[in-house]
Image: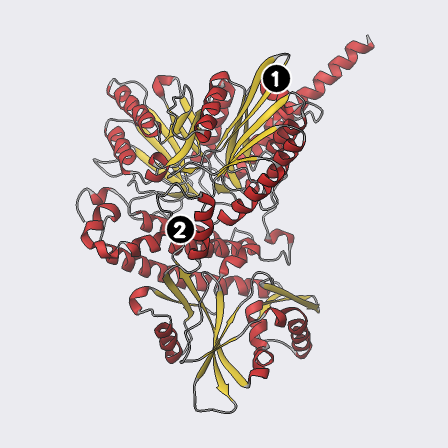
Amino acid sequence: MSKVQSQYINREISWLSFNERVLQEASDPATPLIERLRFLGIFSNNRDEFFRIRVATVMRMLPLRKKAVPLLGMEPAYLLDQIQHKVIDQQYRFDQLYGEILNQLRANNVFILNERQLNSNQKLWVRNYFLDEILSAIFPIVIDDTKQFPYLRDRSSYLFLRLKSKKQEDIPRYGLIEIPVPPLPRFIVLPEEDGKKFLMLLDDVIRFCLKDVFLVFGYTPSDAYCIKLTRDAEIDIDGDYNENILDKISRGLKKRQKGQPVRLVFDENIPKDMLKYLMKRIKLSKKDSPIPGGRYHNFRDYINFPKIGKNEWVYQHPHALSHPQLLQPSKSILSAIRERDILLSFPYQTFDHIITVLREASIDPSVQSIKIALYRIAANSKIANALINAVRNGKSVTVLMELRARFDEENNINWSSRFQEEGVRVIYGVPSMKVHAKVFLISSVLKGKEVYYAHVGTGNFNENTAKIYADYSLLTCHSEIVSDVKRIFDYFENNYSGTTFKQLVVAPFRMRNKFLNLIHKEISNARKKKPAWIIIKLNNLVDREMIRALYKASNAGVKIQLIVRGICSLCTEVNGLSEKISGISIIDKYLEHARVFVFCHGGEERIFISSADWMTRNLDHRIEVACPVLDPKIKREILEMLNIQLSSNVKARLLEKKVQINYKLPKSGEKLRRAQEELHNYFLKKTRSNKGRMNKSVEHRAKTINK
């Protein structure tokens, strides 16, 4: 590895470290017991997507060999080998943890049974349940050497089993059963007995009733082992813009299910002859990353592990708070925005405020139009329903629907059709670029004057994820910001018109240069012995030009503090390279999703909230928006929140060069600080303070009236 390459951490290796931090949450005894199972599910789901996208990309680069080194930092084959070893090590730890958690559940009278552990009453109940609820959803396949091997769907889990023919016992046969989740639940709750609670995985219910499945086919099943195939999930879209993007995405979704295999996961106890037969029939070799695992796959289902047992086994999420400026239920939220900018911080403050803004706009007679960019929305979206209601109330509604939001394409296509049926004008993104900006614009006429309300945020318009994703939403009537948001929508509607922005920083037009210039300003100030520092909060820090600029700033004496949840390719605290750069990653019960950039700027802090990570794709190939925070009170609030996070010493990990999983530990005499809990208390204190002031104001008015 060259000296230049050693200055960067490979993004895939860094990502695996991030996912190991997720696995740490499953291993932490302080994490509630069922939440530990759910973190195993999150870890597993993350890893699936990693193989479907990143590993698939590396595999596509195998023919490039040394030519790929500038992009990957090493040859693709070597990187795949590194990934394979790390994934197997993590799988071993995963299986250990799963066993430990099951033991703790058993110690508390909660049992996850397999098909060999049922008593006579349970056997009868399980078989009846299978016949009533499951059998009709089972479609077994008998594998014959003379026929093509059945197609294995991406990310579906299967039972691969040996069959014995009653007529031709000497001929080996195999069978395949897809575990039907969905539509069936993965976890089956059995009747309680003597204060003990019992669950069974659907896999084991099927194993228990295999004879019922194959009885009519004349086969006796045995040796059922779980397997799963992961496929390349990237959707290739050609550059022919004459074709409807909707048709391209729809066709791409069909192709995704038939993508090239990138990983086979199998039960490590599967007999060698069965594994050899399977790999031969699906045309995989040992070079294709076969991963030995435990008895069960598709642990992503554990994200929805049922609430069973004690209340303290799950996180007790506090009730989301109202924003202090929006405490009066009778007050119009649009009028509150006209008074001053409002910053909402989710999940500590309620996402209902965003729904209320759009709902109020859909009804308010003064509102003329609503324009919004949607990337990921809920399947049963209140946001979408508010927009449809606006159309029904005679408003003009325009939705930019980004159909290329990975793994949300089908949901977005469905909503696009619904919108069009209701009379919403739908725009399908921008050719060659994803629209990742989180913006909307409401236009109204008050007393003969046009009034605009704008939203710029860091997260999606999704009421479900807003409960667990930590994000910011800025609501404003600031004339230059709303004018810039209006220009963005003008660009969406006419992709080939050039535009400039007064306040917003928009990718791919000037975001990279803007932030590079702000970094260089800090370098200049540091050389002049002026105050110079930077705070950056991101999901991923990968872009090498931005990293080189931060290295240069560090060498000039600029203090840089990083909060990076996921991938961090920057090497922190390396002598002669990044001595002034420190970094942490916070993994806790909420997913840190907000992007925030703060520059000292000679003591007049420049603060931005943004939809964009510092990755090449975000800076150069997507429509992203960063918004300056102009209100002094909100600037102070963001700095206070960042300082709480930077001081975290409970759920924070140090982003070191070689290891990115070591906990940041409290110093001697330092109190324990868990950022997400402190942030809730921070907002709770603000809400109570404002309620107190409101009550005093009401009392004062009442006394005045009585006099």
Which residue is at 64% across, 58% downward? 309
Q: Can residue 574 be seen in this view?
A: yes
Name which residue type carries label 1: Val
Which residue is nearer to you in this view: 130 or 428?
Answer: 428
Badge 1 element: strand
Which residue is nearer to you in this view: 498 or 28?
Answer: 498
Vertical comparison of 585 with 153: above or below: above
In the image, taking residue 612 as reference, residue 383 lies left or right, namely: right
Name which residue type carries label 2: Ile
Vertical comparison of 403 with 608: above or below: below
Badge 2 element: loop
Quadrant placement of the C terminus: top right
Give the quadrant of residue 600.
top left
Q: Using the image, tell me which numbered label, if any, was put on residue 209.
A: none
How far separated are the C-alphas under marks 1 and 2? 43 Å
Dot 2 crowding, Cα within 10 Å, few <14, some 14–19, many 20+:
some
Please name the residue that numbered disc 1 is placed on.
Answer: 445
Instruction: Please state the horizontal and vertical placement of residue 640, each as a whole percent of the image.
Output: 48, 27
Vertical comparison of 581 with 159: above or below: above
Please name the residue that numbered disc 2 is placed on.
Answer: 235
